[in-house]
Amino acid sequence: MRIAWRFFSITAAVLFYIPTVNATVPDDSYIAGYAAGVLKGLKIEIPSLVVRNGIITVPSKKLPEEDRARVVQILSEIPGVTAVNLADNTVQPSATPPSAPDVTAAAPDVTATAPDEAITKEGVPADDSTVLATGMLPEGHLFKPLLADPRWAHFSAAYRNYIGNNVDGNNNGSVSFGETIPFYRGNFGQSTVQWEAGLQAAVFSDFNLDAPSSDLINSDFIASAYGSVRAGQLSAFGRIFHQSSHLGDEFLLRSITSLERINLSYEGADLRLSYELPYGIRVYGGGGGLFHKRPSEIKPWLVQYGLEFRSPWRIEVVSMRPILAVDFKNHEQNNWNTDVSARAGFQLDRLQAFGRKLQFLVEYFNGNSPTGQFYREKVEYLGIGAHYHF
């Protein structure tokens, strides 16, 4: 437990003493005034256009259908704009949190008072269509991260307690360092359907906290080139990737007489489709295969699917939003047995660093180990971790 406490102390220091970056340049008042001028030049009157945290929300009922693609494209190119949101329903006024005061542009009909989630008159989350900013190195992602996927690239630190059989020790620490970086985003013609291309890369490492020096057990290195597409609530993510796995030196010294080391390295391709339903529910599914692999006897095919819930409502006192996600994988290599990864917890919307939102999630896993060198081993664990996602 002393080692586990030391691991948590280091993790807390890293996560909570990162300088918070919340400044947006240019700010919402500039964007609101700029947008008002653009719409006036186009002779389009939208009295309830809203800007908040760089996101422009336009009530689509006020915007002629034939002008939507053109207006969205022009607004998304305004400096500082991270997304343009077309809201199909009327948004009720809502008290603005203290950290985000109302911003009024020079034009009296442009304000920044909308809540993070649009709510209709009936109290149902609005069915919005969000169009993100285009160009080189844009912010955001067309395909949202898979919250319960043990191998989705992001920054995280977690403690895991293995139940019964374990990879190495019952108390493990797990960290990941990585991100999905879009290089370029654009629209298909004059439509609001968008595409992006970029790089996804990450390192996943596991440590034995029961060992005297918290030995490194294994590190998985993943790098890929990806492309994604989004049309309304439907999105797709495809990639060509490489993964290699490497055992830690101290682990090898302790296990050299009993371990069968595998030179695990492969390249493959996969595709996932995602659809976002009302009330913050998301479903996704897809699969992929390996086209170059070592050892060569590894069977290539994989199926993946899952369900997520990101609450459209939050506890305003602490700006906390509940989250629940479950991910399923079936590998041909493991006779199509199901690997289950489930995570639940909350997201702190106002506590951000480098543009990422902080999540605290408890987790449960049952299936063949996601740790590369141990893919043949059945494991089960409970854990808790902190995660940063864009």
Image: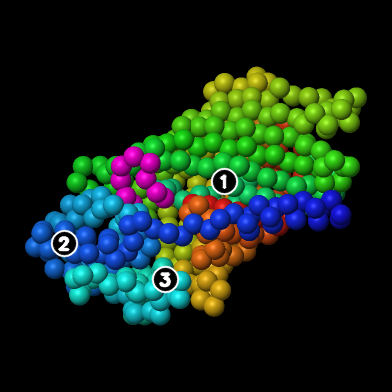
Considering only vertical position in the picture, is 295 above or below 100? above
Q: Is 372 left or right of 28, judged from the image as shown?
A: right
Kind of residue at disc 1: His
Which residue is more in the foreground, 231 or 7?
Answer: 7
Q: Is 63 left or right of 255, judged from the image as shown?
A: left
Which residue is depicted at the point 52% across and 42% down? 179
Give the residue at mark 1.
154
Q: Which numbered mark, 3 or 1, is in the foreground of this view? A: 3
Callout 1 touching callout 2 (CB < 8 Å): no
Secondary structure beneath disc 2? helix
Q: Which residues are magenta?
A: 131-140
Which residue is more in the foreground, 195 or 133?
Answer: 133
The answer to which image quadrant residue 71 occupies is: bottom left
Instruction: Point out residue 131 in the picture as x, y percentages from the top left corner.
Output: 31, 54
Tell me which label, 3 or 1, sits earlier in the chain: 3
Kind of residue at disc 2: Gly
The disc placed on residue 100 is: 3
Considering only vertical position in the picture, is 158 above or below 197? below
Mark 3 and mark 2: span between their CA atoms? Answer: 23 Å
Give the residue at mark 2.
37
- Quadrant, the N terminus: bottom right
Tell me which label, 1 or 2, sits earlier in the chain: 2
Tell me which label, 3 or 2, sits earlier in the chain: 2
For residue 283, say whether it is visible: no
Secondary structure beneath disc 3? loop
